[in-house]
Structures are given as C-alpha cells and as structure tokens.
Amino acid sequence: MNVIRTVSGLRRAVADAKAKGATVGLVPTMGALHAGHVSLIDRARKECDFVVVSDFVNPTQFNNKEDLVTYPRTEAADCEKMEKAGVDVAFIPSVEEIYPEPDTRVFDLGPVAEVMEGAMRPGHFNGVAQIVSKLFAIVEPDKAYFGEKDFQQIAVIRRMVELEGFKLEIVDCPILREPDGLAMSSRNVRLDAVHRELAPAINRILRESIDFALTHSVEETERFVAGTINSTGDLETEYYQIVDSLTMQPVDPSARPCKGMVGCVTVYCGGVRLIDNIKY
Ligand code: PAF
C-alpha cells in the first residue's frame, strides 16, 4: 500500500493506474476506521482494479469546534486496516494540503440539504460537498462508496455530483452493525460503558417501529420512536423524521409509513451524538 500525503502525488498514482487501464474506486473517510469502513473497501476492491481510500478529518464540515477537536484520530491503526483490506493508495493529507486557501465555495444543495442534519448542523453539508468535490476532482474515480448510516449525506452527495457534472457512480452500502444492533460509527469509541449499554436501544426501537407502523400513521410512528427513545435511560432524541428516501422531504403525516420512506434519527447518548435510520 502506498501512503500518499500530497495532492500531486495522488494525481500521479491515479494517472499511472489509469494509464494501465485500471478502473478506480474511491472510499472517502475521516479515518478512525471500523468494520463498516472495511466493508466499503471490500466492495470497492471487488468492483474496481485500483482502490484509493482518503483518511482526512475535514474541518469545514464541523459546525461544532469541540466535535472537531475530539474526533478520534487513529492513523497507525487505520493504515494497518487499509493494508490488510488490500487498499492501493491511502491518501492522508494535512489540512494545509487540502485547503491551501480557505474554501469559500457555497453549493446550491437545495431542499435535500435543508432538513434534518442540514437544519441541525448549519454549514455541515456544504463542508461535505467541498471535500468530496475536491476528492472527486483529484481522483476522478469510476465509483465512490458511502455508507447508508449517513443516509441524508448520500442524497446530498448525489445532488452535488449533479450540480458539478461529475461522471461517476455513487455506490451506497448497507449499514454495518455491532452484534447488539448499534450502527458502527467512529464516534462509538467515545461512549462510556453505561452509554455503550444503552445505545443499542436506538436500533431496537427503530426495528420495533416497523410493526408499530403497520397500524399507525407517520406522525404517530415518529412520536412512538422519539418518545420510546427518550424514556430509555439517558437517551435524548434530537429529531426522528420519516422522509421520502430520495428527496429527504417530509411525507404526509397522516399516511402509513411504507416502501420509499426512511426514518432518520439523531440521539444524544451521554453527550455523544449518534445517528441511525430504518427503511419502511
Ligand atoms: O462520512 C464521512 O465520513 C464524511 O462526511 C466524508 C464523506 C468522508 C467527507 O469528509
């Protein structure tokens, strides 16, 4: 595995691979790699000849300074996992390498980025669009891989791709879960023992909502999920919203949750912000 820290080095490595006829897969990450990331890499490995993984904690997508400071950074362990998973290039740049000057681009991401995470974390999706568009412009991959835990993020990235005219396939990959159902996340390492025990309730309640939704409306199901989570120990729901799974827009509150709808939740668990979702 080639560890590359400069944009020019990455461009050269990718150009060499493409000159040999290789198809290129990109897995953008912020490091602190876990089995969920490895599943994205495995998929890229199966589908592409040359796999690039970026490992970069992107400051422009953090609307909360403390979250940026405390975000886990585990470069040595990440490199071991990437090497083992058969990654060709690990791109691990500095902030100065990616942003020699402040990135002032504002993307017209539209309604898809205005709800849920977009409403709670102003500027977050614009920052995601900044870094992902830079990576796409440098690597020009055939395919890029993203996890469905960040369900809304995928919809926003698809919108950015349309806006910028990138020619690539966005591949969305299923959420990987711990045996007790907790969605794998780099933030899970920040849960203390008590909250690590509590956190799987989020997925359990989301799964219970599938049965509940058979006889209740969207509005009632939203109330059921948020209310049940909030009455579980120290969990606090920031939002639970059932939306159209393509547009991310709210659906008719009196309708039955059904195929084509996804419920997205954000929960504070002992100060750690966890997200998850479920398809109806
Ligand atoms: O999902 C993430 O880890 C990040 O938002 C991404 C897509 C790597 C951009 O920094």
Image (tube, helix red, strand yellow):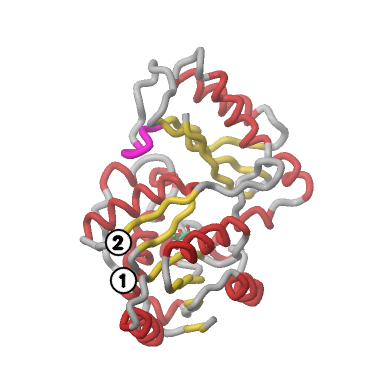
264 relative to 149, above or below: above
Residue situated furthest top in the rendering = 215
The residue that label 2 is drawn on is 168
Q: Quadrant of the N terminus?
A: bottom right
235 with respect to 27 (left or right)? right
Q: Residue at x 38, y 31 (%)?
A: 260
Labelled disc at residue 52: none
Q: Is mark 1 within 8 Å of ligand 1?
A: no
Visible residue check, residue 85 = yes
Identify residue type, mark 2. Answer: Leu
Extent of the magenta region: 243-248
Expressed as whole percent of the image width and height from the top left, the position of residue 245 reads 38, 37
Visible residue check, residue 100 = no
Q: Residue at x 68, y 39 (%)?
A: 200
Taking depth in this image into account, of 33 and 128 the one nearest to the observer is 33
Sooner in the amino-acid sequence: mark 2 or mark 1: 1
The residue that label 1 is drawn on is 140
Expressed as whole percent of the image width and height from the top left, the position of residue 242 reads 44, 30
189 relative to 6, above or below: above
User: Which SS type dominates the magenta stretch?
Assistant: loop
Taking depth in this image into account, of 26 and 200 the one nearest to the observer is 26
Expressed as whole percent of the image width and height from the top left, the position of residue 11 reads 35, 82
> Rounded to the nearest whole Å, what is the CA distance between mark 2 and mark 1?
8 Å
215 relative to 58, above or below: above
